[in-house]
Image (cartoon, helix red, strand yellow):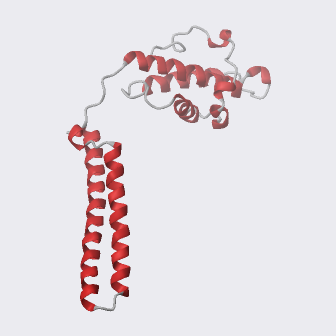
Amino acid sequence: MLDALTITEEEAAGLSELAALDLAMARDFAARAQAETDPNTAADLARCYQRMARSYRQSLALKARLAREIAAAERDAPPPPRDEARIRARVTEVRAATRRVIWAEHDPDEGEDPDEDMPEICFDLLEQRLLTKARDDRFAEPPLDDHVLEMCAAIGLSTSLARRWRDLPDPPSDELGDEPHRQSSA
């Protein structure tokens, strides 16, 4: 059904161009009809104005209808098949990036965080959240930076650090450990 509704970008641009021309002509006929002193000519121009205004309204209505039908067809389309490899790869990417933010915010060597367990707690929260999020078949679709920002916000980390996660160092490998909960295969 979506294929029947799909129009090319050129066709969509053409429809927009037609609507713009209809509006311009309607304005022109309206101005000329209002300025005309001969009643018969003014009436002819007014009819032309009405036709162009109607054509303009129809073009707008068609654009709106197409947009609604395409949106409905996309909503009703079956979800894409689950791409396990891509989802696992995204989980790994989000995990690595978010761990950088956790470590930058809660580095125990900095002496700022009195709770030495905070990085561990955040790592655990990250794993729980990744397990939940990875159940979504479309998990790998949004941009990686969006995922990192969302994940950091969800576990209470600084969003300003999350925005610059690429510039942050990786946590020391001895801090990540090999515990199963740390290396879960979401």
Quick check: 51 above or below 34?
A: above
110 relative to 68 in the view: left or right:
right
How many labels were placed on the picture? Answer: 0
- Apparent side of residue 8 relative to residue 147 in the rendered image (left or right): left
Q: Quadrant of residue 50?
A: bottom left
Quadrant holding the N terminus: top left
Q: Where is residue 183 in the image (x, y as percent from the top left)?
A: 52, 12
Judge by depth and name the residue closer to the eye, 57 or 144: 57
Q: Position of residue 163 (x, y in %)?
A: 63, 34
- In depth, the one of 42 and 51 nearer the eye is 42
At x 31% / y 47%, what residue is drawn?
11
Point 36% across, 56% down: residue: 17
- Quadrant for the C terminus, please: top left
Q: Is residue 176 above or below residue 28?
A: above
Taking depth in this image into account, of 161 and 154 the one nearest to the observer is 161
Based on the displayed image, in which of its 4 quarters is residue 56 positioned? Answer: bottom left
- Taking the spot 54% from the left edge, 31% from the top edge, the residue there is 151
Q: Is residue 166 above or below residue 14?
A: above
Q: Quick check: can you spot residue 118? A: no
Against 68, residue 42 (above or below) is below
Whether residue 29 can be seen here: yes
Residue 55 in the figure: left or right of residue 127: left
**Residue that lies at the very extreme toward the right in this rendered image:** 111
Residue 94: image location, x then y, percent: 54, 23
* The quadrant where residue 98 appears: top right
Query: Who's the residue at 25% across and 69% down the image?
Result: 54
